[in-house]
Image (cartoon, rainbow, N blue to C red):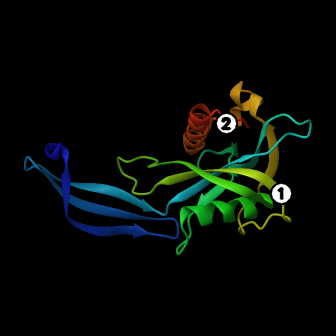
């Protein structure tokens, strides 16, 4: 499959801010084709599928609701965020769960990782499963975060009763990893 591979010849930064770097990458293919490609270099992300029973004892997930500027809408999401410099994705998952929800977990299982869009993005999203949740205090949010914490019945998400969950492709990827984990292990929420 070497005939499909491109090789980078040079790269230059076109724009950079606190979220990403826009890079122009000069590439050549095995057949001699050349091109300049635009890449978005972002930090990796970590999402946490946090198992937590509903108040009436049903299988549930600890989730967050927040307004997403790019989509101009409320999104129901798994807790998560950027892997900070010097962290690995496991540390970031633990930190994000604590900061966004005020909870810690006794058990952590990495259930998947994926590139959000390999055509132009260079980062990965790592999904962690957290079990044995316990409250450890309040939220510790970033200055521009406004987040509500909710326990959502797993059955409601499975039945499509939470349309604000289905607006974020990265959440759908983490949902896939969770459902695959359940299928492979017979894992019960």
Locate residue 106, reporting x and y percent.
74, 58
N-term-proximal mark, 2 vs 1: 1
Q: Residue at x 29, y 62 (%)?
A: 24
The residue at which mark 1 appears reads as 134
- Number of marks: 2
Residue 42 lies, with reference to residue 60, above or below; the image says below
Locate residue 145, reporting x and y percent.
72, 61
Q: Residue furthest right?
A: 56
Circles 2 and 1 in contact, beta carbons < 8 Å: no
For the C terminus, the quadrant is: top right
Q: Is residue 178 left or right of residue 124?
A: right
Helix, strand or loop at mark 2 = loop
Q: Which mark is residue 187?
A: 2
Q: Is residue 173 left or right of residue 123?
A: right
| Location of residue 181 by image quarter | top right
Q: Is residue 131 left or right of residue 126?
A: right
Taking depth in this image into account, of 22 and 148 the one nearest to the observer is 148
Q: Residue furthest front?
A: 185
Locate residue 188, reporting x and y percent.
71, 35
Locate residue 13, reporting x and y percent.
33, 69
Separation of marks 2 and 1 at Cα, in angstroms: 20 Å
Nearest to viewer (mark 2 / mark 1): 2
Q: Residue furthest left?
A: 32
Residue 105 lies, with reference to residue 72, above or below; the image says below
């Amino acid at each position: 499959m070497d005939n499909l591979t491109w090789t980078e010849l040079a790269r230059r930064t076109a724009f950079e801010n606190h979220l990403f770097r826009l890079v122009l990458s000069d590439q050549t293919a095995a057949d001699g084709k050349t091109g300049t490609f635009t890449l978005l270099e972002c930090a990796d992300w970590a999402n946490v599928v946090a198992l937590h029973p509903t108040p009436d004892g049903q299988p549930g997930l600890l989730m967050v609701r927040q307004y997403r500027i790019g989509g101009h809408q409320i999104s129901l999401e798994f807790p998560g965020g950027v892997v900070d410099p010097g962290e690995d994705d496991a540390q970031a998952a633990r930190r994000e769960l604590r900061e966004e929800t005020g909870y810690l977990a006794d058990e952590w299982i990495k259930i998947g990782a994926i590139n959000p869009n390999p055509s132009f993005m260079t980062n990965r999203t790592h999904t962690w499963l957290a079990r044995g949740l316990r409250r450890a205090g309040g939220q510790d949010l970033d200055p521009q975060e406004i987040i509500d914490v909710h326990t959502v019945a797993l059955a409601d998400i499975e039945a499509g009763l939470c349309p604000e969950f289905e607006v974020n492709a990265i959440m759908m990827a983490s949902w896939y990893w969770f459902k695959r984990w359940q299928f492979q292990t017979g894992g019960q929420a």
